[in-house]
Amino acid sequence: MELHGKNLIGGKAVASAAAKTFSGVAAATGEKLSPLFHEATMAEADEALALAEKAFEEYGRQPAEKIAAFLDRIAEEILKLGDELIQRAGAETGLPEARLAGERNRTVNQFKMFAELVREGSWLEVSIDHAQPERKPLPKVDLRRMLVPLGPVVVFGASNFPLAYSVGGGDTASALAAGCPVVVKAHPAHPGASEMVGRAIQNAADAMGMPKGVFSMVHGVSTESGMRLVQHPAMKAVGFTGSLQGGRALFDAAAKRPEPIPVFSEMGSTNPVFVLPDALKQNGKAIAEGLAQSATLGVGQFCTNPGLAFGCGGDEWRSFVERVSQLAGAVAPGVMLHQGISARFHEGTGKFQKVPGVRVAGKSSAEATQGRAPAMVFSTDAKTFQQQRVLREEVFGPSTLLVNCGSTQELEQIARDLPGQLTATIHGTDEDLRQHANLVAILRGKAGRLIFNQFPTGVEVCPSMQHGGPYPATTDSRFTSVGTFAIKRFVRPVCFQNFPDAALPVELRNKNSRNIWRLVDGQLTKDDC
Ligand code: NAP
């Protein structure tokens, strides 16, 4: 596919002669890649938003089967891009081919998974309460409730998943599945891969006869362009993955609008790992190996990267720190996604090194050249960790801080004081769990996913996954951005009172023609009513 570097607005490729341009950059070498990409002008962004608003009524009314077929078609169109997509994404992000091929599968399967969900239909949470005109002292009215789409959604592509959490990622798939048109702000770190996937979605929309504004994608390298999308009155929700600063700025801007809208930002997390005493004694070596592997996987550029680990004890903890450090020393420095992320990694690890009481316990033995990150292991004690708030901040990359707690009481107090997290992990034996029942209860209040004797990296896409936790991990811990429940972010409930059957949406009518699960007068059933 020959890239044109234009914005994709309502089925057209658009670039103004007055637009500012920028280039994609090869992550490994810093070289500029062709072609030039055109930032969307304000007028172009406004056009995408107006088209999304116009498309909403028509798209939101499409039968479930048609939306499902559209999602399946997007999956096919992405696959049709072939290995050119993997090559372009690889050049722009420095991610290896095998990882990107896996990510493409995940991307395609997400569309297919949402297509199945939409076809099956029970996710609409239909509830029907029949009228009881004879009820005393007051008659009961006929009430029927279901979920309906919120309206056009702005999606900010993430830099660390150029396929699965970018233009055609989970946010776009779940918003389209919910019946919401999408306007994507492409991440400037992989504009070529963004264009390819954006064009695949446009092709699918054309082929399936979808309204013009159902999908648009704009380029931008300044925060202004993203802000404009969030502030536009046509937009009804935002999906974002990235930095705490960015996610929070968008959340604040959305709250300040004359009509505030929900912002589902997935931001920073240090994903603490707690190594309990009996497990440390019995299994310390294997846990150290697992931790070193998880912390350095994919150059540490995962939101579930374990950036903190806590344990108690003298010699056993010292051996544990030594083992993790040795393993990190053997890890070759890896190419980071973009210059900004690389600069922030070096800044973050630099800050840790300046904290009195923190030592560098291990570091990749090979020299890290420009744009690469060495694996780094820091070590400190609980007192220093509790006093120096900077040590709780996420350092995005292959870095982990190991904290020696004097006692399990101290370890539990640290857990209580931690900010919200995507995940929290416990390594323990049955005996440890008996002794530390409190810790499980504390961590349940802190994290969206609790992991036992495994590691947090690797996020399965399925209905039971929860990828979202208390702030600052996300801006709304009631929702997930991974798995089928992600669709719930982009819908709201509506109740119809006393409507004639024929005027109701098909899902709420007496005849259950879609054969979905419905709560009828308090009973879950697929029967007509
Ligand atoms: P980012 O700086 O937050 O940017 C993500 C997207 O949001 C970009 O399209 C960016 O647009 C836009 N954006 C950021 N701040 C904005 C603002 N104030 N107003 C409007 N738009 C805004 O994330 P990144 O470039 O991917 O990586 C930077 C840091 O984010 C990393 O070092 C890491 O700490 C964190 N990160 C976290 C995760 C995670 O999964 N939790 C994933 C990736 C990155 P522009 O680029 O055009 O400004």
Image: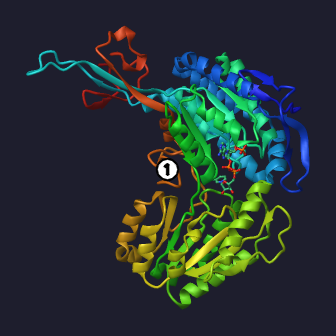
Residue at position x 49%, y 34% in the image: 260
| Residue 310 location (% of width, % of height) | 52, 75
Q: Is mark 1 within 8 Å of ligand 1?
A: no
Q: As rendered, which of 371 and 224 lies closer to the eye?
A: 224
Identify the coloring: rainbow
Q: As rendered, which of 121 and 130 lies closer to the eye?
A: 130
| Residue 220 location (% of width, % of height) | 75, 38
Q: Is residue 417 visible?
A: yes
* Residue carrying label 1: 466
| Residue 158 location (% of width, % of height) | 67, 46
> In the picture provided, is 321 more to the left or to the right than 444?
right
Location of residue 1 by image quarter: top right
> In the picture provided, is 228 more to the left or to the right than 518?
right
223 is higher (above) or lower (below) than 57: below
Q: Residue type at mark 1? A: Gln
Residue at position x 72%, y 61% in the image: 344
Q: As rendered, which of 114 and 423 lies closer to the eye?
A: 423
198 is higher (above) or lower (below) than 161: above
Q: Quadrant of the C terminus?
A: top left
